[in-house]
Amino acid sequence: MKKEALAIGTLLLAASMTVTAGHRDHYRDTAKVIEVEPIYRSVEISYPERECWDEEVSHYRPDGRRYTGTVLGGIIGGTVANSISRGRGRGRDAATLAGALLGGAIGHDISQQNRGGHYTTSVERRCEVTQHSRYEEQLVGYDVTYRYKGRVFTTRTKQHPGKRIPVAVNVRPVDD
């Protein structure tokens, strides 16, 4: 009976080991790092820059309004129209008025053409924003070569692994 109990216990222990072996078919270990090579990528960095300068600028300043040409044109036009108009009364008055208006308009136009003025120069601050860019090398990761159980493997990592790298080991039976 003792032998039977021992055999049953051994059988149960072996069965439980088989059942739990499926849950323990992977584990973590570390491997020796052989070589680490940094990976860089060239990145364009764009930035705005405000550039300002002083610029000399000329402005034309016309002289103030003058009415001398208009008034003189009106007087001359009215006088000429009055002297050449025939007749008396309203016809002559209308001709004088028309001559004065026409002479005033002509005098105004002539005085505007010859009005004159002067140039002034001032210094004005001018600014503009331009886009500049520069290229920069950015570290994006590492190509890592490591040895585990006599075999050599490579991987890419974001951080430098140091002298040892953690590895996940999966164990499965091989079907022949």
Image (tube, rainbow, N blue to C red):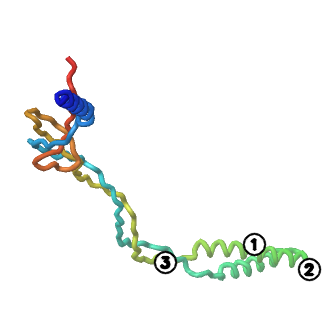
Image location of residue 102, percent across then percent down: 75, 72
Q: Residue at x 73, y 74 (%)?
A: 103
Q: Amino acid at mark 2?
A: Gly
Q: Nearer the viewer, residue 150 or 170?
A: 170
Quadrant for residue 70, please give it: bottom right
Whether residue 14 is visible, yes or no, is no
Q: Earlier in the sequence, mark 1 or mark 3?
A: 1
Image location of residue 99, percent across then percent down: 78, 74
C-alpha span from label 2 to label 3: 48 Å
Quadrant location, the C terminus: top left
Which residue is denoted by mark 3 in the rendering?
Answer: 118
Quadrant location, the N terminus: top left
Q: Residue furthest right?
A: 89
In the displayed structure image, the side of residue 97 where residue 53 appears, left or right: left
Quadrant for residue 71, please give it: bottom right
Which residue is denoted by mark 2 in the rendering?
Answer: 89
Which residue is denoted by mark 1 in the rendering?
Answer: 102
Q: Residues within 10 Å of mark 2 (few under 14, many from 20)?
A: few
C-alpha span from label 1 to label 2: 20 Å
Mark 2 vs mark 3: in front:
3
Quadrant for residue 37, please give it: top left
Q: Earlier in the sequence, mark 2 or mark 3?
A: 2
In the displayed structure image, the side of residue 88 where residue 15 appears, left or right: left
Q: Amino acid at mark 3?
A: His
Q: Is label 1 in contact with label 2 (beta carbons under 8 Å)?
A: no
Q: Nearer the viewer, residue 3 or 168?
A: 3
Q: Residue furthest front?
A: 1
Q: Earlier in the sequence, mark 1 or mark 2?
A: 2
